[in-house]
Image (cartoon, rainbow, N blue to C red):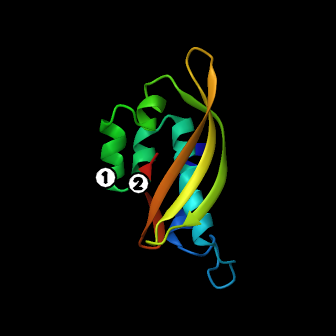
Amino acid sequence: MTRTLSFLVLFCLLSLGTHACGDAESSPEITPEAAATAVVEAWFAAVAAGDAEASYALGNAAFAEREREWGPSFSHSFFGGGTRVAAYEVQSAQAGDDGSMEVRVRATLARENGSEDGEGMTFTLAAQGDGWQITALN
């Protein structure tokens, strides 16, 4: 239920583009950085819920295919690889010269054996309609 509610709230946010949910005339503007960060936050929520398909759906087709197929991808580690995200913090969100958005995250990953390590993650997103889609995760 919580996962469904979270995705509905995110869908509302993204479907309205640069306005928060509610009355678009009176709602404060949402920056492109905040909108792209919301997509990354939704990706982490999908990972925490163990919902691989929801995490793939936040990206374009090439991203989803790469995450499904490429052995060293973060997705392989999280979905079946015995790794979970213990904590994460968005470090920055910055627009690229090509109109893309880059969101940098510092995550603490917990392994099956109990060890933890810090990992830098960079999400690249592209504008898609009124929202953002993940195009790469490094």
Residues packed near mark 1 inside 10 Å, few (<14), some (14 to 19) or many (20 plus): few
For the point 63% across and 43% down, the residue is: 106
For the point 52% across and 66% down, the residue is: 14
Q: Quadrant of residue 28?
A: bottom right
Q: Position of residue 56 (x, y in %)?
A: 40, 47
Q: Amino acid at mark 1?
A: Ala
Q: Which residue is mark 1?
A: 62
For the point 55% across and 17% down, the residue is: 112
Residues packed near mark 2 inside 10 Å, few (<14), some (14 to 19) or many (20 plus): many
Q: Position of residue 38 (x, y in %)?
A: 59, 58
Q: Quadrant of the N terminus?
A: top right
Is disc 1 placed on a helix, strand or loop?
helix
Q: Amino acid at mark 2?
A: Gly
Disc assigned to residue 59: 2
Residue that lies at the very extreme toward the bottom in this rendered image: 25
Q: Quadrant of residue 88?
A: top right
Disc assigned to residue 124: none
Residue that lies at the very extreme toward the top in this rendered image: 113
84, 45: nearer the viewer:
84
> In the image, is residue 45 above or below residue 108?
below
1, 79: nearer the viewer:
79
Q: Is residue 114 left or right of residue 39?
A: right
